[in-house]
Amino acid sequence: MRVKFTFALLLVLLVSSLIIPATIAQESDLGTEENPIQVFFVPSVEAQVIVTGGEVMAQALEAATGLNFEVFVPTSYAATVEAMCAAPDRSMGFIPAAGYVIASARCGVSVEAAAVRRGWNVYWAAYIVRRDSDIYTYGDLEGRTWAYPDAGSTSGYIVPSVELADAGITVGEGVEAGGHNQVVQAVYSGEVDFGTTFFSPPLVPGAPWRIGDNPEPYDLTVDESRLNEEGNLFVGDVRILDARANIRETAPDVVDQVRILRLSNPIPNDTLSFGPDFPEELKAQIMEAIYAFAQTEEWATSIGSEDFYGWSGVAPIEDSVYDVVRLQFEVLGLTEEDIFGG
C-alpha cells in the first residue's frame, strides 16, 4: 500500500512539475515583448489622435515599469468590451461609465481609477442644436432626428436615452454618427435636428463654472468666437471645452452655428479598468506609473489633450460610484444586447 501511495504521489508531483511551472511562466512573462499588456481605448474621438497619444502613454509606462504595452483602438465601444473580456489576464482599458458597467457584468472587469477633468470627477451629456433651429425646449425634440456617437456611449446615448424616455419624448430617426466629433459635425451641417455629446465645463476667468450655471456663459452678440494663437477655442475670454471644440480646426465658427439646448444630470467620469484576471502586482505597478505620468508635461500630449480624452488627471474610484449608471439601465429596461446589438 505504501509503495502504491508513493508511486501515485511521485506521479502527481511529476505531472505538477510539468503543469505548474508552465502556468507560472505564462503569468510571469506578461509585459514582455512576446506578451505585451494590451491597452484599449474607445473610439470616441479621431482614431489617429488616440493612437498617437496612446503611444506616448505606452512609452512613458514602459520607461517607468520596464513592461511592454500594445495600444489598440477597436472599431466600437462594444468591440472594446469584447476585446477586454477576451484578454482577461492581460488587458487594461480606458472605457466610459456605461461600457465599464457592461464589461463588469459580462466578465468581471474591475475599475481602478477614473478621469478628473479640471477638478471635476463627473461630466454631462449636452443636447446640441443649430442656433437657427426652431428647437427651444426639451419637448421640442419630439419626433426630431437624433445623432449620437455610438450606442455604447454613456453621455452620447445611454444617459440621453434614459432622460428622453423619462420625459415621455419619442424622437424620430436615430443616426449612429461614429464619434462625438461626427455628432457635432452632423448638427453643424444640418444633417440632423439635434445631437448628444459630452460636455466639459468652460473655463470662465474669475468666476469658475458651477453646476446649475448656464452651459454657455457668454453673449455672442457681444463676445467674439475665435481661435487663439495655440489653436484653442474661445468666446471672448471663455474657453470652450465641450465636444464642439473638437471640430474647431475645420469649423472655427462652430459655436456661432451650434448651441447647447440643455445638459443632462451629472455622469461619473470615464474609467481606467483592468481585465478580471490581471495580476495584482503588475496592476499596482502600472497604477503607480500612471499617477506619476499624470504629473508630467507629456500627459498633455496624450490622454490629457483636449483633442484626445481631455483628462487633466486621474484618481482612485470605487465600483459603487457606477451604481447610478446601473440604475439607468434598469429604468430603461436595457440589456447589453439592446445597447451593443445582439
Image: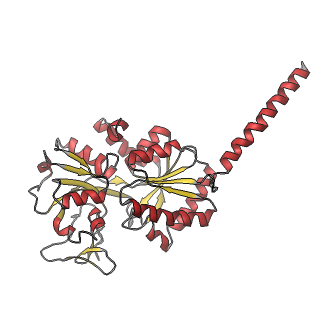
Residue plotted at (61% across, 52% down): 35
Q: Is residue 33 left or right of residue 193?
A: right
Q: Which residue is at the front of the view, 132 or 163? A: 132
Q: How is the image coloured?
A: secondary structure
Task: Indicate left or right for 239 with 261 as reference.
Answer: right
Where is residue 14, by image quadrant?
A: top right
Position of residue 287 measured from the top left corner of the image (x, y, whole percent): 55, 58
Above or below residue 89? Residue 284 is below
Q: Is residue 335 visible?
A: no
User: Which residue occupies 37% across, 62% down?
Assistant: 120
Q: Pick the quarter of the image with the C terminus.
A: top left
Across and down, in percent, residue 66 comes to: 64, 62
Image position of 107 (left or right of 329): right
* Res. 289 image quadrant: bottom right
User: Does residue 278 appear in this view?
Assistant: yes
Residue at 55 percent across and 67 percent down: it is 60
Residue farthest to the left?
Answer: 134
